Image: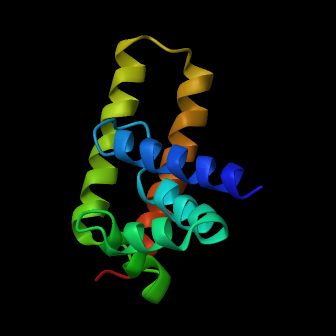
Amino acid sequence: MRYIWLSFGVLCVLAGFIGMFLPVLPTVPFLLLAGFFFGRSSQRAHDWLLSHKQLGPAIHDWHENGAISRKSKYLSAGSMAVVFTISVLFKIPVYILIIQAVILISVSYFIWSRPEV
């Protein structure tokens, strides 16, 4: 079972890494999941993730304060705007755009209502 948890952790780190470059994929939730999976499988992998120069601070901020950095908030808002714009440009049906807008507005509200570090 330990190898399954470790595999899920690695997949989540990969998804989080890809999410740094793709506006559709969120980074921090995948990293939080990776921390959970690594915590169940490998102390070494868990320690690596938490001490990582790029990935660790966001996890620490969330665990300690439930906080999201202002930079991350702006990046998430920008990526959501890009995704919605792409949907409009591809002429996605209006009912899907409405559903997408409601979800993106809800996620934005959650993100911007979190404290900042």
Q: Nearer the viewer, residue 93 or 34?
A: 34
The residue lying toward the viewer, choosing from 94 and 40, is 40
Q: Residue at x 36, y 39 (%)?
A: 18
Where 95 sits versus 102, above or below?
Answer: above
Whether residue 112 is situated above or below residue 75 in the rendered picture: below
Image side of residue 63 versus residue 21, left or right: right
Corner quadrant of residue 80:
top left
Residue 104 percent coordinates (x, y): 49, 46
Look at 57% across and 67% down and name the residue there.
Answer: 42
Q: Nearer the viewer, residue 77 or 41?
A: 41
At a point 25% along the width and 58% down the height, the residue shown is 74
Left-right relation of 17 to 108: left
Q: Nearer the viewer, residue 35 or 81?
A: 35
Q: Is residue 9 left or right of residue 66?
A: right
Instruction: Where is residue 38? Give x, y as percent.
Output: 57, 64
The quarter of the rendered structure image containing the C terminus is: bottom left
- State the residue at coordinates (44%, 87%): 65
**Residue 101: % across, % down:** 51, 39
Residue 116 coordinates in the image, percent (x, y): 31, 80
Say whether residue 99 is left or right of residue 27.
right
